[in-house]
Amino acid sequence: MADRTTETLHPSSVGLHLASAEDVFTRLLDAQIAAVSTIRPALSALIAAAEASADALRSGFRLGYAGAGSSGLMALADCIELLGTFGIPVDRTPMLFAGGAAALMQMTGAVEDDPAQAIPDLARAAFGSGDVVICVSASGNTPYTIAVAQGAKANGAHVVGISNFAGSALLKLSDFPVPLDTGPEVIAGSTRMGAASAQKVALNMLSTLVGIRLGNVHDGYMVNVVADNAKLIDRAARIVAAISGQDPEQARDALRKSGGAVKPAILIALGVEPRQALAKLQAGGGHLYAAMENILPN
C-alpha cells in the first residue's frame, strides 16, 4: 500500500490542523479542482469506454457497474440515475456493490476485502458476451472489484476499469482502462475526496455520451426522461414546447397523446399522427433529429 500515491501526504496537508477555516477550504477546493483535471489526459480512454458501453446497450446487451466503499458509491450514483435521466431500464444496468444494500447504510471495509462476496453477485448478474461492466476502484486493487472484473471477463463481458492508481491490477486486466492519476489526498488515504470526485465526473461524462449515442439527448434536452413526478412532468412539457416550437398547452396535449413519452410527443406536436410517431422514431434508430428530418422545413 505504501507505493499508492493516494496514501502519501499531500503538500497542502502540512499544518492543516492549525489553518483557518478559509485556508482549509481553499486547500480542499484547490485539491478537488486538481483531481478533476486529471480526467483530461484520460479523455481518449474514457471515450473508448463510453462508445463500447453505448454499443452494448444499443445491441440489446447490458451495462453493469461494480465497486466497493466510496468508489462503489460513485458507481452506484451514476448507475441509478440512468433510468430517470435517459430512460434506460434498470434491468439493463445491474449494480454490484460489495456487501449489498446493507453496506450502504453502514459501510465496513471487510466486505471489500473479500473476493468471495463477488461470487453470488456475479451469479445473479450473469454477465456474458456483449455486456460491458464498469468497475471502479481508487486503488485498483480492491479484492471484491477485482473479482467482479475477472469473473465478468471469464464469462465474455468487456470490462471498463476506472482507477486512481496507474499501476493497478484493475487497469491491467481491463479491456478499457481509464487511469485517473489524482495523486495524494489532503487527508491521506481518504479517497472519498479527490479520487472520488474525479471518478464521479468521469462517470457522469461516460454515461452522458452513452445517452447521446442512444438518441436520448437532443440539444442538451433529456428527451427520453421518465416523467414520474410533478417536476419531471413539467420538465417534459417544457422540452416538448422548446423543441417543437409549440405553446405549453399544445405540448401537454401532445404528451397526453404519447402517454408521457417525450420524443413521440415532440413529433405529435409537429403534426405527426400519434400512431406514426413511434414508427418514425424506430426508422431513425431512436434519434429524434433523424425522425424530424422530413417534418421540419430546411
Image (tube, rainbow, N blue to C red):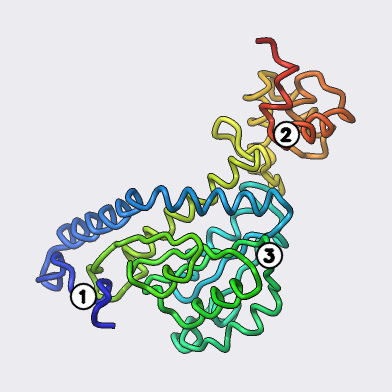
Query: In the rendered image of this protein, does residue 93 appear above or below residue 16?
Result: above
Nearest the viewer among 139 and 80 is 139
Could you say where residue 88 lies in the image, as x and y percent from the top left?
68, 52
Residue type of the residue flagged with mark 3? Ser
Residue type of the residue flagged with mark 1? Thr
Could you say where residue 228 lies in the image, as x and y percent from the top left?
72, 49
**Residue at left 25%, top 72%?**
5
Quarter of the N terminus within the rendering: bottom left
The alpha-carbon separation of the residues under discs 3 and 1 comes to 39 Å
Single out the mark in the foreground, 3 or 1.
3
Single out the mark in the foreground, 2 or 3.
3
Q: Earlier in the sequence, mark 2 or mark 3?
A: 3
Q: Which residue is mark 1?
A: 8
Could you say where residue 129 lies in the image, as x and y percent from the top left?
68, 65
Q: Which residue is mark 2?
A: 263
The alpha-carbon separation of the residues under discs 2 and 3 comes to 31 Å
Single out the mark in the foreground, 2 or 1.
1
Residue type of the residue flagged with mark 2? Lys
Q: Which residue is mark 3?
A: 129
Could you say where residue 169 lies in the image, as x and y percent from the top left?
41, 75
Query: In the rendered image of this protein, does residue 132 appear above or below residue 281?
Result: below
Rendered image quadrant of residue 95: bottom right
**Residue at left 72%, top 34%?**
263
